[in-house]
Image (cartoon, rainbow, N blue to C red):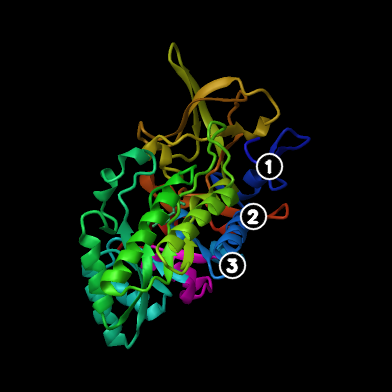
Amino acid sequence: MLYDNLSINEKGHLTIGGADVADLAAEYGTPLYVLDEDVVRRNCRTYVKAMHENFGPDAAPLYASKALSFKGIYPIVESEGMCVDVVSPGEIYTALAAGFPAAKMFFHGTNKTDEDIEYGVKSGVGYFVVDNLNELEVLDRVCGECGVVQKVLLRLTCGLDPHTLEAINTGRVDSQFGVPIDTGQADDFVRAALACENIQVDGFHSHVGSQIFESDSFIRQAEILTSYAAKMRDEAGLVLKALNIGGGFGVRYTEADPAIDIAARIEEVANHMKAACREHGLDLPTVYMEPGRSIVADAGVTLYRTGGIKEVKGYRNYVTVDGGMTDNPRYALYKSAYTVINASKAGEPANFECTIAGRCCESGDRIAEGIRIAEPARGDVIAVLSTGAYNYSMASNYNRIPRPAMVIIKEGSASLAVRRESFEDLIKNEL
Ligand SMILES: *Cc1c(COP(=O)(O)O)cnc(C)c1O
């Protein structure tokens, strides 16, 4: 099995966190998102422990909640000592509704509207991660009106492309996120922020990308940001108190993806960052990282039931399921690979080659192509692994398909965390 929380029981059914997925499908219906809370907690602990050990007790991982935002996730990550990254007033609202403290929120977003900025300030978010000069001006004004001094990190781009490290100073300077160091524009951004009366500049934020398996890009980024902080200390009087080096550690979607030792990677990054700080005569700042996918992806499984199973003679077999791009658009968007199991026959050999297609009237509605599962019959439960991240949070109602329910598994038993949408939900805002 791809993950150690998955197993096969005496009925030949797949189990997740000890729960039989055929029972879950029967009780809660399909499609169904299943989230193993123990795995989420284990992932949080890996980050919290490694960051405390290597960066000191003030360091913290932020859970990037865009990966999976619903009320139930926030108390879990909070109790594990995580802060959160929120990218919209909707995520702030959800986290607040779940009782998550605003002071532990970092408010991201490349286009925060004036209303968003006011909402963030009035909510009392701990940090704004300021993306650009326009945002800075509005934030300073709103904070003045509210009588608040807002802590901020300035979002910078380091000119790194995580997948082609040699191509430094090319593609990634050209980004809609943050302000580039390489073009000199970050200097003006930092000076402008330092001059704002109602803003306290604690440091920088930078995020290189996603599905990263090595530490190189984090190390390069830490080096670039510390050296830049030293330059701005000398030229503009910046005092670096905090550094957020972003998220992006990869997860295993299939056996082809490597397993990654996150604690060891964090130690490597910390060693380089400490050395860079020494070299530039800087105190080690409070370090933040922002994992999203690597907190929740491997904790999630999506269950479907098979409908039509058809062979297009001379071409391939199609297995259609009762969900698809509406609950998981990642194959349609990025051709993302997934591990798929016939969970009703998990003990049988996976020798039926097929394409898993969704139920939408859309030829791109697929979950996987050219995979092998145990020979399916109509009504079998199909499990798609590693769907905890960027599935529920990216779901839509295309074709007027209600979003699935979500259950959380804790110590082997399931409880409903998100109700299945009803047809009334589909039309409730329509006049
Ligand atoms: C998406 C994102 C993350 C999380 O990325 P993962 O690949 O899910 O770890 C963190 N920080 C920022 C700014 C992001 O945009």
- Classify 17 as above or below 254: below
Q: Amino acid at mark 3?
A: Gly
| Neighbours of disc 2 within 10 Å: few (<14), some (14-19), many (20+) | some
Q: Earlier in the sequence, mark 1 or mark 2?
A: 1
**Label 1, label 2: how far apart the Cα atoms are:** 12 Å
Give the extent of the magenta segment: 81-104
The x, y position of residue 392, in whole percent, is 47, 51
- Which of the two residues, 142 or 403, is positioned nearer the viewer here? 142
Pointer 2 residue:
42
Q: Is mark 1 within 8 Å of ligand 1?
A: no
The x, y position of residue 150, in whole percent, is 36, 79
Q: Earlier in the sequence, mark 3 or mark 1?
A: 1
| Neighbours of disc 1 within 10 Å: few (<14), some (14-19), many (20+) | few
- At horizontal 58% and vertical 39% (from top left) the residue drawn is 259
- The quarter of the rendered structure image containing the N terminus is top right
- Which of the two residues, 1 or 326, is positioned nearer the viewer here? 1
- Classify 225 as above or below 199: above
Q: Amino acid at mark 2?
A: Arg
The x, y position of residue 35, in whole percent, is 59, 51
Quadrant hosting ligand 1: bottom left
User: Left or right: where does residue 276 sit relative to residue 234?
Assistant: right
- Classify 130 as above or below 416: below
Pointer 1 residue:
4
